[in-house]
Amino acid sequence: MSIQWFPGHMNSARRKAAETMEKVDLVIEVVDARLPQASCNPMIEQLRNARQRPCLKILNKTDMADPVATQAWIEHYNAQKGVTAVALSCKKPSDVARIPKLAIQVAPHRGTALKPLRIMIMGIPNVGKSTLMNALLKKRVAAVGDEPAVTKTQQRLYLGNNMVLTDTPGMLWPKIEHPSDGLMLAASHAVGSNALIEEEVATFLADLLLQRYAQLLKARYGFNTDGMDGVAVVEGVAAKRGFRLKGGDYDFEKASHVFLQDYRSGALGRISLETPASRAELLATYQST
Ligand code: G4P
């Protein structure tokens, strides 16, 4: 599946982001800890590198990600030049309270009343940018919602008297290069529900979970996954929940929806859809074809 999702406002968001990049000292890039690389926007790195701005990379929603995979990602990103990575949950006040200090550590040449640290918060839709802003400022300043692209205009806000925050509209790149990235983003709801076919996404997710988290499927739905493929898992969900069409066939659409909801809500457990190793494998596959 290739998801083409490029609303008009994304173009102007890119232009605005490039302009703002000139005027900031630090980029806080928010990604989803469950799929950190698939939820990175390559545009952000390009814009940042062009201006040589340091990056505090926040692997957010770590409460829902696999802690072992998250640790591997932190090490992976911390090995990159100009990047400091941290895993946290923007819904946890004690996690958010760590961010100002980290920001000053990453860009120590600013951060006084006279020279406030100018920070730009970036990331694709639905990774938690608004939640982060609200938590940092301890008030509701941006719309938070589970439908992507809720944050559409740029905001500039003072954090104490030594930091200024600017966020940018969520940006997705015009073409998702690897189909599996599109499916991972769809599974985690970074692309809107109208742009995806839930059955296809659910089957992809089930196949992926069978490889790495079969025990969680078993724990949630109580069936033995031996010999199953993704379709069989979704059918298994339909059977367990009694989702049947008139005539008795499984209601695959309804089961797909419920299965995706279970993943998105965290009911299946802490799951990461990719690791640095699986990413390297994916890239090797694409390079060899
Ligand atoms: P955005 O600005 O990047 O588009 O994302 P936004 O803050 O709107 O967050 C998208 C969804 O992710 C929201 O869920 C938000 O609550 C959730 N979220 C943000 N940070 C975390 C986190 O650290 N952990 C978890 N588990 N979820 C997080 P929602 O269901 O739309 O809103 P709500 O009902 O949770 O308020």
Image (cartoon, rainbow, N blue to C red):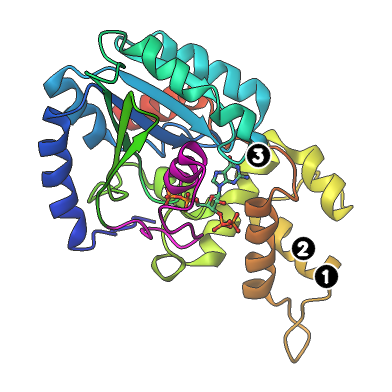
Q: Residue at x 59, y 50 (%)?
A: 205
Is the CB atom of the residue marked by disc 2 within 8 angstroms of ligand 1's nearest atom? no
Residue at x 54% of width, y 30% of height: 96
Left/right of residue 210 with respect to residue 226 in the rendered view? left
- In this view, 145 is above or below 248: above
Quarter of the C terminus within the rendering: top left
Q: Which residue is mark 2?
A: 237
Q: Is residue 267 above or below residue 21?
A: below
x, y percent for residue 115:
22, 18
Residue placed furthest toward the bottom:
246
The region drawn magenta spans 127-152
Q: Amino acid at mark 3?
A: Met
Instruction: Provide the secondary structure element on which disc 1 rests.
Output: helix
* Horizontal arrangement in the rendering, residue 222 relative to residue 171 (left or right): right
Asked which secondary structure carries label 2, the reply is helix
| Labels 2 and 1 touching (C-beta < 8 A) | yes
